Image (cartoon, rainbow, N blue to C red):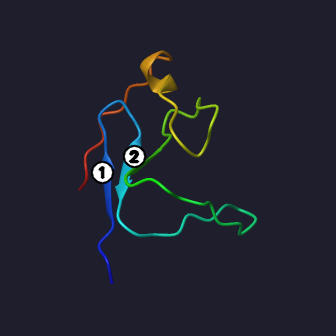
Amino acid sequence: MSEVRIKVLKDGPYEVKGAFQLVDAKRASFNLNEDPIYLCRCGKSATKPFCDGTHNTCGFKADETAR
């Protein structure tokens, strides 16, 4: 099995690397052609669940660290 890594970027999105399947609430799969992908954490992206960089202009701040 290949390794998947999720990195929390300071004041930014989740960076996801590796082979995985992303499925929405209706069980439809996203076609992922990039590695890594970036998932929105600020909630303001126009391309949710993907990051479009809006966190840079909306004042999003998050300092969480992995436990």
Which residue does the numbered mark 1 point to in the structure image?
7
Q: Which mark is residue 20?
A: none
Which residue does the numbered mark 2 point to in the structure image?
14
Per the model, the C-alpha gap separating discs 1 and 2 is 6 Å
Of the two numbered discs 1 and 2 on the same chain, state the one appearing first in sequence.
1
- Residue at the extreme bottom of the image, as rendered: 1
Give the residue type at disc 1.
Lys
On the image, the x and y values in percent for residue 62 come to 36, 32
- Tell me if residue 1 comes above or below residue 65 in the rendering: below
Give the residue type at disc 2.
Tyr
Q: Nearer the viewer, residue 56 or 60?
A: 56
Q: Are marks 1 and 2 in contact (CB under 8 Å)?
A: yes
Query: In the structure shown, which secondary structural element does the residue marked by tag 2 occupy?
Result: strand
Query: In the structure shown, which secondary structural element does the residue marked by tag 1 occupy?
Result: strand
Which residue is at a point 40% across and 69% down the rendered structure image?
Answer: 19
On the image, the x and y values in percent for residue 15 come to 36, 48
Which residue is at a point 56% across and 64% down the rendered structure image?
Answer: 22
